[in-house]
Image (cartoon, rainbow, N blue to C red):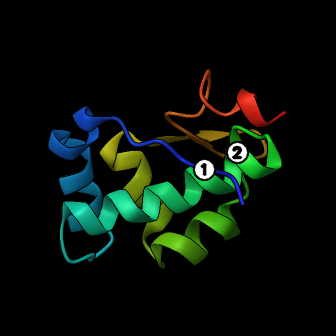
């Protein structure tokens, strides 16, 4: 299992509050934990884009809209590009 480092700035980043609200999560810490799951999956698979099905499985039925609205992901040709991966997941490769 790959390790994920969460920088201290993430704990005050408003995007996680938006993600929590959009995905009906309890709070920004819960949203940050869900993003850590996505980041870990990206790290282990060495990918920047995840299929929509994985994002939905982790974030719930409004996960796609939530991650895009929060600015933590964006649509890509093969799914959702997860922000915060480029330059941070390559170490495991």
Q: Are marks 1 and 2 in contact (CB under 8 Å)?
A: yes
| Identity of the residue drawn at 47% across and 71% down | 59
Residue 26: quarter of image: bottom left
Q: Nearer the viewer, residue 29 or 50?
A: 29
Residue 23 image position (x, y, % from top left): 33, 71
Secondary structure state at the residue bearing disc 1? loop
What mark, if any, has residue 43 been given in the picture? 2
| Identity of the residue drawn at 31% across and 46% down | 70
| Identity of the residue drawn at 77% across and 37% down | 92
Residue 91: quarter of image: top right
| Identity of the residue drawn at 21% across and 45% down | 11
Q: Is residue 19 left or right of residue 4?
A: left
Q: Nearer the viewer, residue 9 or 23?
A: 9
**Mark 2 residue crowding within 10 angstroms, few (<14) / some (14–19) / many (20+):** many
**Mark 1 residue crowding within 10 angstroms, few (<14) / some (14–19) / many (20+):** few
Determine whether 37 is above or below 82 in the image.
below
Q: Give me the C-alpha separation between circle 1 and circle 2.
A: 8 Å
């Amino acid at each position: 299992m790959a390790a994920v480092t969460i920088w201290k700035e993430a704990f005050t980043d408003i995007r996680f509050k938006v993600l929590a609200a959009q995905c009906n999560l309890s709070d920004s810490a819960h949203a940050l934990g869900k993003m850590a799951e996505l980041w870990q999956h990206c790290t282990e698979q060495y990918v920047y884009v995840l299929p929509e099905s994985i994002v939905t499985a982790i974030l719930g039925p409004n996960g796609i809209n939530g991650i895009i609205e929060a600015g933590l992901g964006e649509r890509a040709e093969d799914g959702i590009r997860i922000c915060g991966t480029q330059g941070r997941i390559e170490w495991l490769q």
